[in-house]
Amino acid sequence: MASSSGHITPMEEKTFSFSPSAQVPHFLRNQYRSTSSRPTSGPSSCASSVIHLPISPSRNASFNEKNASFSVLQTLPKFTGENPANTSNPSTASSMTAAEKPAKEGRKHNLAFSFFALLSVILSGVVIAFGWINTPQQKLCLAFQDDFTGRTTLNTDNWEYEVKADGFGNKEFQMTTTQADNSFIEDGKLYLVPTLTSDEVGEAAITGNYTYSLNSTCTAFPQTSDACESVSNSTLGQVLLPVKSARIRTKASINRGRIEVRARLPAGDWIWPAIWMMPEDSVYGEWPRSGEIDIMESKGNVVESRKDRFRNSVTSTLHWGPSAATDRWGLTSSNFSVPRDYFSEDFHTFGMDWTPTTLTTWVDKPTRQIMRLDMNRDFFAFSKLSHLLWNGTAIQDPWNGKKSAPFDQNFYLILNVAVGGTNGYFSDIDRNKPWQNGGSNPVADFWAARSRWLPTWPTDPKRRGMAIDSVKMWQRC
């Protein structure tokens, strides 16, 4: 999730897809330069069998792991006679013509391909499992837990609302509220739900001359009109923020440990759910000097292509750098996609293991990794910014060579559902995007195109919002 201050450049998503050709050794790839040059399965005089090889899902594997398998065609020749191995026996000698001989070679290559493909899958699984097993084990103490059982409203002993109307640092298209239609608990689950502002004030107020004030609920400091009010002005073409939603944070914080959030993500174009962390005290300075940990972010958009990274995909990112302009998130971001499954359909556990030496984010189990990072490093050296100038001045190390900094301090957890924004998380190349991030009036453009995106929003608020079943935080003891 973008920070509450600063500007983030468009995210370059990292997705790794399983490609059998990428696993074939060089000497085999040379013979399989194109589909047309690959050997066929063999002549009709050969029997065929199909071997199903189960694939264990590895990091960022872009296939449906529920039904993950691939088939390798193995052609087996039919022999006549008593001694098929003795080719000198006329009754059992091969009767293949010269045209049929390439099929025999094809069988050899098919078997070699299946061996190396299976070996690569096994090795990738071993690498992930080995990395998880070798993650330094740490003694953990439960620091926070909420499963929302027996409640109808948020427990304010555990949580705080973040209520603002300035779009936060991402220039999002929603304000956040404490209203019951934007956050509620039902059947032991917390729902954070985006709603249309026009449902409360009418469509005319969105484009007319209207001031929507969050009044005393606004948590901005100081409580300025820019932070706590949204204003429409028909003369200027300025519109009210057209969406309301919710954003909450834990009162507890941790410095290393584990996070587990079991949640179902929302569906709907341009809806942006996030599970992320910000520093309790910005000990190294303003964002992103003191860091940001995005455990999970996703886009609720409809998936129309195998290349789409929307509700079938989640991303983890660390934001860090000497300034907003030098945020080096691109070095610490990774994506996990399951193209034929949607994170808006079922509940998943989004987790993070954070030690002095590693930070790993995962889905459902620690071996199903989104991102794994070495934290025992000098992040300024890793940034490769030391040789650059900013406005004619050398960029200074805000962490003074301290390893793990800025990720060596207490961070609290944030859960929120945003809509739109101009920070670049929604790229201008995203399909059907109705606004440009650098446009003169992106909020108005978004609202004007509601006939395109609103039909993708479920009428059921429980499906339009993020449903949270439980939240757990462990602190390193």
Image (cartoon, rainbow, N blue to C red):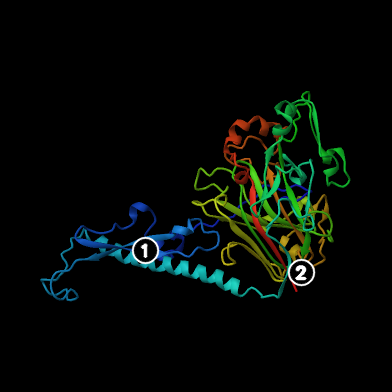
Between 98 and 207, the one lying in front of the other is 207
Which one is earlier in the sequence, the residue at label 2 or at label 1? 1
Kindly indicate the quadrant of the structure image that contains residue 170: top right
Indicate the secondary structure of the residue bearing disc 2: loop
Furthest residue toward left: 91
> Residue 229 at what x, y percent from top left?
82, 37
Between 232 and 44, the one lying in front of the other is 232
Residue 426 in view, yes or no = no
Image height of 50 relative to 443, above or below: below
> Residue 363 at what x, y percent from top left?
59, 60
Indicate the secondary structure of the residue bearing disc 1: strand
Residue 384 in view, yes or no = yes
Furthest residue toward front: 150
Marks 2,1: beta carbons within 8 A: no
- The amino acid type found where label 2 is placed reads Lys
> Residue 27 at what x, y percent from top left?
40, 65
Kindly indicate the quadrant of the structure image that contains residue 48: bottom left
Q: Quadrant of the C terminus?
A: bottom right
Circle 2 Cα neighbour tier, 10 Å, few/some/many (<14 / 14–19 / ≥20): some
| Left or right: where 417 falls relative to 119 | right
Which residue corresponds to the image point at 56% horizontal and 64% vertical from the top-left? 368
- The amino acid type found where label 1 is placed reads His
Q: Which residue is mark 2?
A: 403
Circle 1 Cα neighbour tier, 10 Å, few/some/many (<14 / 14–19 / ≥20): few
Alpha-carbon span between mark 2 and mark 1: 47 Å
Q: Which residue is mark 1?
A: 52
